[in-house]
Image (cartoon, rainbow, N blue to C red):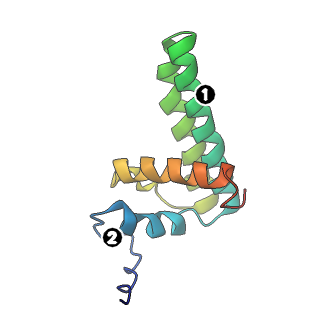
Amino acid sequence: MARPPAPKLQANARYRTFHDFYPFYMTEHANPVSRRLHVIGTGLVILALVAGALVNPWFFAAAPVVGYGFAWVGHYVFEKNQPATFKYPLFSLMGDFRLFFETVSGRRKF
C-alpha cells in the first residue's frame, strides 16, 4: 500500500502529531552549528537531571537554563529563526531528544 504524501513543511501550520512535526523541526535546525548546540545542550540537560537526582536538587533548576541557552543561541545566532518551543513546547522537547539520540547513536552526523 502506498504511503501518503509527506505534509508540507510550514512554520505557520498546526502539527497534530510528532510524526508530522519532526520533518518541520529538522528544517528549523538546518545549520550544523545549531544542531551541535542542541545536542550539547540536551546532553547537559541529561547530566543536570542525573546530578539533580544524585548530587544536589539545585541541578534540576540548571537543566532548562543550559538546555534552552544552547538551543536559543543556535536559533537566534545561527538559524536566524524563532524556536518552535513557543508554539510546540512538547513536540520541540521531543525533537531535541530525538535529535540527541539520533546523533549519539550515529544515525545522524554530528
Q: Residue 36 location, x and y as percent? A: 68, 51
> How far apart in space, not on screen, are marks 2 and 1 (Cα)?
34 Å
According to the image, label 1 marks what residue?
47
Q: Residue 95: percent from the left, percent from the top?
A: 47, 54
**Label 1 crowd bin: few (<14), some (14–19), many (20+), radius 10 Å:** some
Q: Nearer the viewer, residue 45 or 98?
A: 98
Q: Position of residue 24 (x, y in %)?
A: 45, 68
Left or right, residue 90 beside residue 39 = left
Q: Kindly indicate the quadrant of the structure image that contains residue 70.
A: top right
Residue drawn at the location 50% of the way across and 13% of the way down? 58
Mark closest to the chain's N terminus, 2 or 1 = 2
Query: Residue lying furthest front in this view?
Result: 1
Q: Nearer the viewer, residue 11 or 77?
A: 11
Task: Give the residue at mark 2.
Answer: 12
Label 2 residue SS: loop
Kindly identify the amino acid type of the residue bearing the numbered disc 1.
Leu
